[in-house]
Image: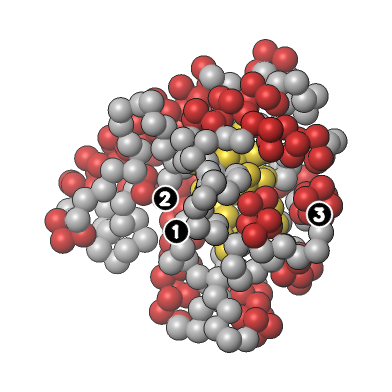
Amino acid sequence: MKIGYPCINRRIGCSSGRTFRLSSYSDERLEETVRENLRCLGEILRFNLKECILFFRIGSGLVPFASHPVCTAAWEETFAREFGEVGRFVHEHGMRISMHPDQFVVINAKDPDIVARSVAELRYHTALLDAMHLDETAKVQIHVGGVYGDRDAAMERFVSVYSRLDESILRRLVVENDDTRYTLADCLRIHEETGIPVLFDVFHHTVNPSGAGVAEAVEQSGATWRPDDGILMIDYSTPMPGGRKGRHAESLDNADFERFLAETAPTDMDIMLEIKDKEKSALAAIGIAHRDGRFLLPAER
């Protein structure tokens, strides 16, 4: 079991997702920005290793505008050495990486232009992980997409577009249940038709359930992952006290996390904490999980 957090480290005074205005794009500006983003990513990963945080979600903005037609920079070749160094660091220290494109990636859209832009964005994400020479346990997660007034037809469009995706995308793509439209049961149905692994979002399941309890849901999701995919990835969070429905908590609910670990034993999984204080909650979760036999510190692996 590995525990991690997404994209931003609040203790480190840099960002691996720096960007600039599209109107000011130039290849030189892009390369300058990517160089700084990669430097910061290295700092974050070194911090994580020191603190035994071995799961990290890289933000989509590492290479700004990479999937946009304006981007003419050969960023994969320019930064091949730097990407390779990141990948070697991840591999040598037994870390795991994921990515999660923004909500505008909708492969089941009715509009062909939206689908084309979504596929281009997925190509960028998978090309980035390929440039790091990471194996297919490094995943890119997406949601099913919109309902458009006809859930069955929308799911069929997802299956149809998925079947035509590049192999480089298919080896990394996973689908997760969301908090308003598609339940775990819907995602499992799509898995049956496509073989796509299902990433289980615990919080989304609590606000948009499909009948299964959390322990059963974890088991069902885990069964969709093949050996080459690595172990099941989980997104975990709890609701913001007094917040609107679907809003993530500011910090880890220690008691709830302990219950979650106890309830899901002995299923092995890697847990991404979608909690607002990022590495602070990851450190708290690791302190709790160290009492769980599924979690081992690097020296114990």
- Real-space CA distance between mark 3 and mark 2, rounded to the nearest whole angstrom: 32 Å
In the rendered view of the protein, which quadrant contains the C terminus?
A: top right
Residue at left offset 63%, top offset 25% = 286
Mark number, residue 60: 2
Along the line of sight, which residue is nearer the eye, 76 or 64?
64
Q: Quadrant of residue 198?
A: bottom right
Mark number, residue 213: 3
Mark 3 or mark 2, earlier in chain: 2
**Given this view, does label 1 or label 3 mark the residue nearer the observer?**
3
Mark number, residue 24: none
Residue at left offset 61%, top offset 36% = 253
Mark 1 lies on residue: 102
Residue at left offset 61%, top offset 81% = 154
Q: Position of residue 258 (x, y in %)?
A: 72, 32
- Residue 183 visible in the current orientation: yes
- Real-space CA distance between mark 1 and mark 3, rounded to the nearest whole angstrom: 28 Å
- SS of the residue under disc 3: loop
Along the line of sight, which residue is nearer the eye, 17 or 243?
243
Q: Amino acid at mark 2?
A: Ser
- SS of the residue under disc 1: loop
Mark 2 or mark 1, earlier in chain: 2
Which residue of the protein is positioned furthest toward the top in this rendering? Answer: 299
Instruction: Find out whether the residues at labels 2 and 1 contact each other: C-beta distance under 8 Å.
Output: yes
- SS of the residue under disc 2: helix
Q: For this view, does 289 lie left or right of residue 29? A: right
Along the line of sight, which residue is nearer the eye, 78 or 53?
53
Q: For this view, does 213 lie left or right of residue 4? A: right
Q: Position of residue 223 (x, y in %)?
A: 82, 52
**Given this view, does label 3 or label 2 mark the residue nearer the observer?**
3
